[in-house]
């Protein structure tokens, strides 16, 4: 599914009350099943942008449309409850650290990724995903019995559990060594291709980012934070 941002702005109030513009983007789009890397310095607004696309945060103004014109959904116009449902049905999210539930096995964690949509559990699909990420023999392991790289592979499988239209990955390899980072990147990309999900992946590591077909630099897109003369 294509995603189109139009005149999206977000500002925060600093502790002293001053207003800090963080995002001011005229236009940005991700194509159907396209894989895009987003790079930018720390504090430049990458997570804020992902949170707005996911409907965790709403922009102060502008639209974030999912889908083709006639049937497009603007997440910025939905209520919080509607955004939660929309996210559960359409978006997979991968964080820098795995955010798995410690009391549940790898398989249960992936199946829990399905339950928020009210869709029936699909253990075969969950097993397939875990096998795809090389954990077919670790289905019943709890997160603390898995290595950090394996935990992040479970998180990748969980993000694809609902066959999302879009996967948002916020520094998904940031806590991993080079070998594990490469594996996790390859697996995220493979699963997105298999499901047909679009992918927006944040990384500060150019060696990771440049492997994706399109690399976007946030500062080139974003007017917020620039000095007036630049
Ligand atoms: N809830 C908040 N209130 C005020 N400022 C915030 C809040 N969240 C983030 N910021 C500020 O917004 C800027 C962008 O943050 P963030 O999107 O996390 O950047 P990045 O992910 O690129 O490191 C930072 O300067 C940060 O301090
Ligand atoms: Mg961030």
Image: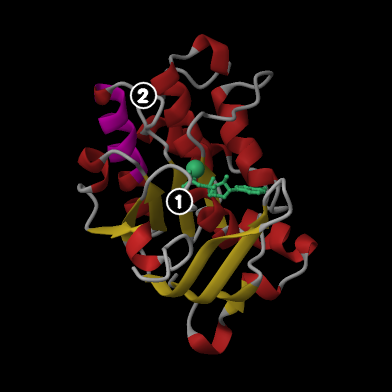
Upstream in the sequence, badge 1 or badge 2? 1
Query: Splitting the image into 4 quarters, where does residue 26 fall?
Result: bottom left
Q: Is residue 187 magenta?
A: yes
Asked whether residue 190 appears in the rendered view, the answer is yes
Secondary element at image label 1: loop
Q: Which residue is mark 2?
A: 176
Furthest residue toward top: 145
Q: CA distance from mark 1 to mark 2?
A: 22 Å
Residue 116 location (% of width, % of height): 70, 48
| Vertical comparison of 73 with 199: above or below | below
Residue name at image x 31 percent, y 29 percent: 181
Residue 205 location (% of width, % of height): 28, 38
Q: In the rendered structure, find residue 107 and report the number of the disc placed on it.
A: none
Q: In screen coordinates, is 167 left or right of 19?
A: left
Span shown in magenta:
179-188
Locate the C terminus and report the quarter of the image it occupies. bottom left
Locate the N terminus and report the quarter of the image it occupies. bottom left
| Vertical comparison of 131 with 147: above or below | below
Instruction: Say if disc 1 is inside 8 Å of ligand 1.
Output: yes
Q: Nearer the viewer, residue 93 or 203?
A: 203
Residue name at image x 52 percent, y 58 percent: 49
Q: Which residue is mark 1?
A: 44
Q: Nearer the viewer, residue 91 or 137?
A: 91
Q: In screen coordinates, is 212 left or right of 171?
A: left
Q: Residues within 10 Å of mark 2 (few under 14, many from 20)?
A: some
Secondary element at image label 2: loop
Q: Nearer the viewer, residue 10 or 202?
A: 10
């Amino acid at each position: 599914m294509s995603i189109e941002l139009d005149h999206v702005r977000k500002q925060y109030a600093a502790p002293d009350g001053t207003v800090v513009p963080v995002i001011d983007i005229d236009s940005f789009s991700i194509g159907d099943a396209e894989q895009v890397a987003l790079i930018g310095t720390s504090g430049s607004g990458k997570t804020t942008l992902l949170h707005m696309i996911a409907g965790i945060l709403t922009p102060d103004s502008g639209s974030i449309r999912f889908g083709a014109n006639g049937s497009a959904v603007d997440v910025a116009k939905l209520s919080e409850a509607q955004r939660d449902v929309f996210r559960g049905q359409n978006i997979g999210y991968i964080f820098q650290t795995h955010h798995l539930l410690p009391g549940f096995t790898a398989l249960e964690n992936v199946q829990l990724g399905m339950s928020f949509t009210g869709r029936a559990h699909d253990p075969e699909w969950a097993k397939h995903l875990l096998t795809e990420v090389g954990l077919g023999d670790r289905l019943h392991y709890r997160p603390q019995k898995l290595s950090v790289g394996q935990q992040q592979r479970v998180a990748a499988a969980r993000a694809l559990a609902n066959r999302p239209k879009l996967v948002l990955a916020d520094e998904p390899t940031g806590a991993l060594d080079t070998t594990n980072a490469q594996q996790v990147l390859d697996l995220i990309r493979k699963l997105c291709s298999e499901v047909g999900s679009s992918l927006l992946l944040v990384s500060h590591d150019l060696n990771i980012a440049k492997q994706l077909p399109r690399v976007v630099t946030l500062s080139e897109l974003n007017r917020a934070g620039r000095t007036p003369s630049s």
